[in-house]
Amino acid sequence: MVVRRNPDGGIVGYRWDRQKWNVNQKITLSNGGPAAGKFGFIAQNADGRFYGTVDGEIHEYRWYGSDPYTFLYVGPVGILNETATAR
């Protein structure tokens, strides 16, 4: 699965099914999280985790096992460095 961010901040999925690429597939965000789903930046890893920034915060999602186009909200990701403060 490859996730692409559209210019409007929405996301779509591309998935290889061993015969062809399924492109521009709608991704459903479930289990809460930012309602708009309009991301400034996105990233993903091989462990089935997807990260996106919304309003300056990083949010984590995980793939839903039986539906690769549904991401379940895990929660906000806390980042601390010398310019950030803990919540």
Image (cartoon, rainbow, N blue to C red):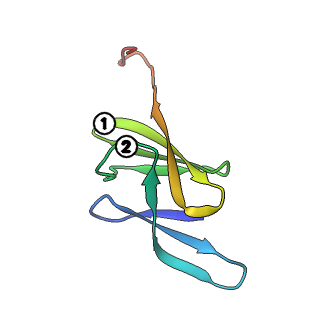
Does 71 sit above or below residue 32? below
Image x and y of residue 71, in percent: 51, 53
Name the residue that disc number 1 marks: 56
Q: Which residue is depicted at the point 40% across and 14% down?
A: 86
Q: Which residue is depicted at the point 59% across and 63% down?
A: 68
Q: Which mark is residue 53?
A: 2
Q: Which residue is depicted at the point 50% across and 62% down?
A: 3
Does 75 sit above or below residue 85? below
Pointer 1: residues within 10 angstroms few (<14), some, or many (20+)?
few
Amino acid type indicated by mark 1: Gly
Nearest to the observer: residue 5 or residue 70: 70
The quadrant holding residue 4 is: bottom left
Nearest to the observer: residue 60 or residue 84: 60
- Give the SS element for disc 2: strand
Image x and y of residue 79, in percent: 45, 25
Q: Which residue is depicted at the point 56% across and 79% down?
A: 22
Does 39 sit above or below residue 57? below
